[in-house]
Image (cartoon, coloured by chain):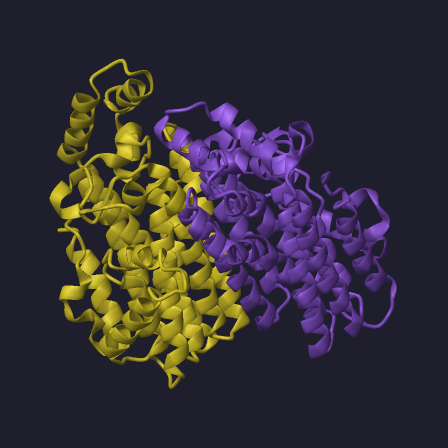
Chain colours: A yellow, B purple
Amino acid sequence: MVTGLDLKTVSIYAPVADQLAQVEGQLRQLCQTDIADLDPLLDYALRSGGKRVRPALTLLAAEFHPHDPSRSQIMAAAVELLHLATLIHDDTVDNAGMRRGKPTINKLYGNHVAVLLGDYLFATSATFVCDTGVVRVIRRFSETIMELASGQLIEFFTTFDSQKARKLYNERIYRKTASLFCTSAESGAILGNASEDEVRALRAYGHNIGMAFQIVDDLLDVQGDAAEIGKPVGNDLLQGVLTLPSIMLMERYPDDQPIEALFRAIKTGDGDVEDLLERSLTMINDSDIIPDCFTTIRDYCSVAAAALDALADCPSRRSLLHMVDYIRERTR
Amino acid sequence: MVTGLDLKTVSIYAPVADQLAQVEGQLRQLCQTDIADLDPLLDYALRSGGKRVRPALTLLAAEFHPHDPSRSQIMAAAVELLHLATLIHDDTVDNAGMRRGKPTINKLYGNHVAVLLGDYLFATSATFVCDTGVVRVIRRFSETIMELASGQLIEFFTTFDSQKARKLYNERIYRKTASLFCTSAESGAILGNASEDEVRALRAYGHNIGMAFQIVDDLLDVQGDAAEIGKPVGNDLLQGVLTLPSIMLMERYPDDQPIEALFRAIKTGDGDVEDLLERSLTMINDSDIIPDCFTTIRDYCSVAAAALDALADCPSRRSLLHMVDYIRERTR
């Protein structure tokens, strides 16, 4: 069974541990604005935890050549802030009540505050990126925000629609997840004075690890443990969001699977939603879908690892490979 | 009585009319994405009209020296897009049903789509600014998005609270409105190769005209005509938002004004909201508050006009002065 990644507990971040602490300090400083009412909100949003995978990726990708660490650190803070901003808006539009086992901003302070706080954090992340002074990474960052938003829009446009969901699945998970992994690694590489070949390699690494990461997340939703993932199991299906395992179920058993009935029940109120969800999840877990999703994850991991062939051996490269292994191990 | 500004109908934009048409074309091109479901939404958002005051300001501010017009035009498109993005989020958080006489995005497509479409437009505006290639204007733009979001947050934190609202009034209207006017003019000046003194002057011009603009807007809400402004009169007070005229009413008649009772009625459901709103608006309109707000608007206009003393006479400067006169004329 796939379990939640807890990269913090392993030694992967070791080569950049001190720098990550600096980044954490930069994020904490955000909670001292000139608007008294805003500070506790920022504090809550920043304390929401998370594994800081994206900033670690930026810092590790920057370590291949001598460089100015202040620029990669500010970039690392920016990618984490952007991630936090998207979580706040995602929870708001999904009307989610819990995230990582804690009440969401929208739940605690209302949608109004959540939308505006998300906007504020989006903008703050952009000012951080501007502090790198490098237009190429600033532009890439803005494009990433577009991809994140359009990925969420694709998710919305494809809810309850298995054909559309299948057709746009890869595009959607690239935009909503892999894009930011890609940009985290690519920006680190650029600010770390990497060659164009190295930038391309780290970009490919980020892309593929991001795709793998999203499918792990999709699997957690169908077979995770609510306490561990900090939100209800089966949440995607209840929202009409079709992920790789549920798409596979519908494709493989077009005439004999409970998802269509589940969607009808959700939309019309006619049918036992809980029972149909349970049956959908059981059918996914009892079929060969999970091993096949594992294969897809491992394929992305292999491409990510292979991309690193273009880079010289060093502690940072070993950490990036370690990250791949760590995800791979989740698929056993 | 103050009436809606319709700068388009006058000759103010004449020196940059061709360029504004180019900007309009750039905005229209946004409606051709690779996501079929997204295009009609973008089309609707961009067709929502508006007077294009901010892009005109950018283009006019750029006209004082020879410069590359493609950069000021892309900047002009960016400030308009940012403005549209903020309107979409503002309408969503205010749960507004109408804007400029048309149903809002949140009303037509739901809050979910409105939040994500706003995010998409924020990000698109940022990529446009990146195309200028000038880090100084990119950074200023990101700070402006922070100011816009924090201005809206201040508005939220000060609803139904007259003391806080008074204390933070100038800061709030600077952030939510004047900031973008400021940045529109400042960015145009920078991209138009203005000297630092000229940049400062155009920034001051934008700031002061933006403050005047917001107070005109506040007045429209207490004395405008619903059909003309395209939304219900008294909407600010119904949302608990205290603007200059209502703050003045509470300050001048602390023991004898209906706003406290109106707020109580809104919050508790105990009292005749419609009657109390009517009495509040009548009391504002029958007192010397409106002429005093006019004076404040004219003061901002005078400072804006004086700022232009630092600039050489040319068609663009005459247009900027004309814009000041146009706002001033609304206060008779």
Q: Is residue B202 left or right of residue A273?
A: right
Could you tell whether A150 is left or right of A328 in the image?
Answer: right
Residue B127 occupies which quadrant of the picture? bottom right
The x, y position of residue B64, in whole percent, is: 80, 69
In front of the other: A17 or B309: B309
Name the side, left or right, on which A236 lies relative to B202: left
Residue A113's x, y, as percent? 38, 46
**Residue furthest toward the top?**
A270
Quarter-wise, where is residue A12 in the image? bottom left
Viewer-proximal residue, A136 or B95? B95
Q: Is residue B93 visible?
A: yes
Location of residue A188 (image quadrant): bottom left
Q: What percent of the width, then of the height, locates residue A148?
A: 43, 50
Q: Is residue A73 above or below residue B81?
A: below
Labels in figure, total: 0
The answer to whether one can see residue A292 in this image is: no
The answer to whether A3 is drawn above or below residue B226 in the figure is below
> In screen coordinates, is A169 left or right of B195?
left
Residue at the image position 72 percent from the left and 39 percent from the top: B4
Q: Residue furthest front?
A: B255
Whole-percent x and y of residue A315?
Answer: 24, 79
Q: Is residue B222 above or below residue A263?
A: below
For the point 32% across and 54% down, which residue is it? A41
Q: Nearer the viewer, residue B13 or A90?
A: B13
Which residue does the image show at 47% across and 48% down from the upper left? B155
Judged from this view, the residue extending furthest toward the bottom is: A66
